[in-house]
Image (cartoon, grey):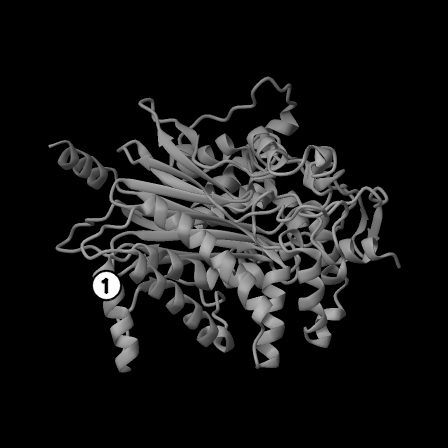
Amino acid sequence: MPVTSQLLRALPRAKVFASCLLPCQHHHSQFGLITPTRDRQRQRSGRSYQTSSRLHSYILTPPQVNSILKANEYSFKVPEFDGKNVSSVMGFDSNQLPANAPIEDRRSAATCLQTRGMLLGVFDGHAGCACAQALSERLFYYIAVSLLPHDTLCELEAAVESGRALSPILQWHKHPNDYFSREAQRLYFNSLRTYWQELIDLTSPGEVPDTREALMNAFKRLDNDISLEAQVGDPSAFLHYWVLRVAFSGATACVAHIDGPDLFIANAGDARAVLGVQEEDGSFSALTLSNDHSAQNEDEVARIRSEHPASERKTVIRQDRLLGLLMPFRAFGDVKFKWSIELQKRVLESGPDQLHENEHTKFIPPNYHTPPYLTAEPEITHHKLRPQDRFLVIGSDGLWETLHRQEVIRIVGEHLTGVHQRQPLKVGGYKVTLGQMQGLLEERKTRMSSAFEDQNAATHLMRHAVGNSEFGTVDHERLSKMLSLPEELARMYRDDITIIVTQFNPHVIGAQRQEGEL
């Protein structure tokens, strides 16, 4: 089998593409004929599922659907003090729905204990889950350390030197399925300690870290450490293999840091953060706080072309992919797009035997002349929260491929306020028969009952992302079919979906803004 074919078979279709692939053929399964959507990864917004009515006769019951949708849901409410919530964040809901087996997305949420603020992030992996897993464990520590003042950094180092217990930096808010790699903790800690030692040398007593700069430094430093750890290796055979897996796989990251009225978004890749703004008439509008780093972003295309010789203008981006292969133009890991060919060969030759079984690691991208082609440097947005800013949705690209951002905000806004239960049924400009109208009314009844079932806003949004009908309601039959697709077919219809919905406290935000104006 050609190397390219083996490479593409090992990588998720949503992130990699090669022109040599044959068009998708119709697939037969135990459920009958299925017609995949054409070129799934090119349909970046407003995608509709094309499922055959003969997909299968077995329909999941509502309890079975709920069991699947709610398996990974998690909710956190910010505790109150003296009966009041003094935080600008009321809480958050999160959820994940796999398409890949295992799922390659990861999520993280934590409260900064040594400084103020909350961190929330979505990490979308490709070529395996190793890099996304490492980011979910490590990136928030790098951000938290970057935000620490000089004196606190010195206290951390003194505690390590004397063998005293370290004061915790983060309070994690994790689902039981969100795990930490115990074997790698010592390695991760040593790299983090080296970073804060350098920060001690670079900062001065009394100096207050800048949030934007802290986010930038944390992203770039962690990606550099991932690269360095893979080059150095580890005496432990397991860790040596693990650090190489992390470096040769990749992941995008979209992280929010919320401290009072200050909301920062740091994004590298094609996950997305969108703010839900409530207008005076009660409706909701979408305010996008991140830019996708992909071929659809003209500024990104110009940036990449400017960083390489004119002779590579036609090859550096081909078929909307970096070097014709990678969809996101910014990502952690992915050293195949960052290291020189000589370095790649040297590291692989000294690596464990298991690594040589993966054709992806031995494959050099075409037209690879002037690396690095890829960066993990984030694009950072700062937004001053207002009372009308009601919630924030962070989602992997699997969400935004299925629903337009305005539809996402409408669904979440109406769910949080209960507006959808009071609105009259609308069919737009469609001509509907009495039978279709009856079906729409039944769907609306199902939607209203699902609102009571879905206490978690991320779950409610996911229900729509997978089962949305042309009328904006949840089609239970469609939802059932999509959730019962076998693993090898699910990836043809959708990507992994990870969602975090963070709800803001308008009263606290209003008071904080008034204090800031005094």
Kindly indicate the quadrant of the structure image that contains residue 115.
bottom left
In the foreground, 102 or 130? 130
Residue shown at 50%/62% (left/top)? Answer: 225
Q: Is residue 96 left or right of residue 83?
A: right
Number of callouts: 1
Whole-percent x, y for residue 332 in the image = 55, 54
In the foreground, 305 or 103? 305
Please tell me whether residue 357 is drawn above or below residue 149 in the rendered image: below
What residue sits right under mark 1 in the picture? Answer: 152
Residue shown at 70%/60% (left/top)? Answer: 342
Please tell me whether residue 248 is drawn above or below residue 232 in the rendered image: above
Whole-percent x, y for residue 351 in the image = 68, 73
Q: What quarter of the picture does the N terminus occupy?
A: bottom right
Residue shown at 33%/22% (left/top)? Answer: 281
Whole-percent x, y for residue 374 in the image = 60, 47
State whether residue 395 appears in this view: yes
Please tell me whether residue 377 is drawn above or below residue 198 in the rendered image: above
Q: How many residues crowd around disc 1 within 10 Å: few (fewer than 14), some, or many (20 or more)?
A: some
Residue shown at 79%/42% (left/top)? Answer: 35
Kindly indicate the quadrant of the structure image that contains residue 104.
bottom right
Q: What quarter of the picture does the C terminus occupy?
A: top left
State whether residue 129 appears in this view: no
Q: Farthest residue in the right direction?
A: 1
In the foreground, 84 or 89? 89
Q: Is residue 435 left or right of residue 88?
A: right
Which element carries disc 1, helix, strand or loop?
helix
Amino acid type, mark 1: Thr
In the foreground, 126 or 75? 126
Whole-percent x, y for residue 298 in the image = 59, 29
